[in-house]
Image: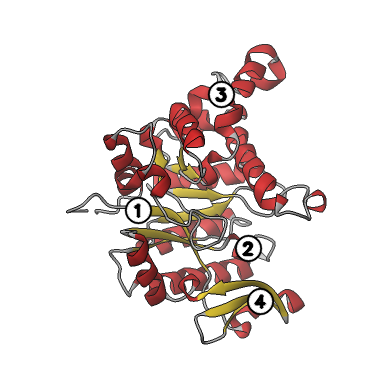
Amino acid sequence: MTGAAPRIDIHSHFYPKLTRQQGEVLELGDQTPWLRDDGDGTGQMMEGDREYRPVSAPLWDASARLSQMDEMGTTVQVMSVTPMLFAYASAPDVGLRWAAMLNDIARDMCELDPARLRSLCQVPLQDVDAACVEVRRAVDAGHVGVHIGNHVSGRNMDDPELIRFLHFCADEDIPVLVHPWDMMAGERMTRYMLKWLVGMPAETHLAILSLVLSGAFERLPEHLKICFTHGGGNFAAQIGRVDNAWHRRDIVSVDCPHPPSTYASRFSVDSAVFSDDALRLLTATMGEDRIMMGSDYPFPLGEIEPGKLIEDSEHLSPGAKTKMLGSNADRFFSLAD
């Protein structure tokens, strides 16, 4: 990266322009995922015949995406597929074919401007052996890391098979971005977007604490590059409570040899917290070297002007802003290589 300080958005999503026939690979019948392009810059995520969510062209069209990046002043986007397409419930062979197809589509999208559009692959985590093969193939093909969900079929991040995958990524120097999905207690969060407002932060907090309190970080290499979206969910706000429990209750500390707050040095988070007070707390908890700009582009709950929260912050130094806007991500994903 040369010239002006880059603005690198590590949390940006795409939804490939899937035909219904391509979506049928997942064998989901009337829930088949595909994308309807209405030809006027708008479209619909589809589930079979049902309209799931209205969307606009930058979600699937690389040219429209680049134009919008110019308008927003975003230098680079690290794109990852919309989590609803993880397909972890599919049979392993189906999941592998699906992941490979989406990964190849992502690389095709990035070819329009490989310096500005970078991609994270997805893998069939329901079969870790297959996931290891696909992540290696995908990174060799140009992906800069892997995007995974925070749980698989009821198994949290401390599941031995998921730890094995993370260990493989550490050994292969493959960065990992963890995103919440398939939120808990959905039957109690049917209104007001509570799945997104309550469920997503809780799922992310659960993922981090699963690794911390289980002692998984003690078993994983220190050079593992792992980042959690949405500012690490509730971690920064609740770490004092967790430390207190660790000191007072042996059922909390039994597998975790050090205070949970000390493990903040083992992972990174994005900046999608939406207020300067929240960013101040996040910086105090994580440090300025472990926060990367993330907007959740192009969805409406994301940061509408990516990077503005960091740029306008009243408490960050110019050096910290430069790190969070771009140089931390440049280093984490080895974008200059």
> Which of the labelled discs sits on residue 91, or is there none?
none
Query: Cα distance, mark 4 to mark 1?
Result: 30 Å
Question: Nearer the observer, disc 1 or disc 2?
Answer: 1
Q: Residue flagged by tag 3: what amino acid is it? A: Pro
Q: Residue flagged by tag 1: what amino acid is it? A: Ile
Q: Are marks 4 and 1 in contact (CB under 8 Å)?
A: no
- Of pointers 3 and 2, the one earlier in the residue sequence: 2
> Which of the labelled discs sits on residue 84, or is there none?
2
Residue at 38% in and 34% down: 314
Question: Nearer the observer, disc 1 or disc 3?
Answer: 1
Check the picture and name the quadrant holding the C terminus. Answer: bottom left
Residue at 58% in and 26% down: 239
Q: Which residue is mark 1?
A: 8
Left or right, 270 with reference to 334: right
Q: Which residue is mark 3?
A: 260
Query: Cα distance, mark 4 to mark 3?
Result: 42 Å
Q: Are marks 4 and 3 in contact (CB under 8 Å)?
A: no
Query: Cα distance, mark 1 to mark 3?
Result: 29 Å
In depth, the one of 22 and 2 nearer the eye is 2
Q: Are marks 1 and 2 in contact (CB under 8 Å)?
A: no
Q: Residue furthest right?
A: 187
Could you tell me which secondary element the residue under label 4 belongs to?
Answer: strand
Give percent across and percent down for residue 87.
Answer: 64, 64
Query: Cα distance, mark 3 to mark 2?
Result: 31 Å
- Of pointers 1 and 3, the one earlier in the residue sequence: 1
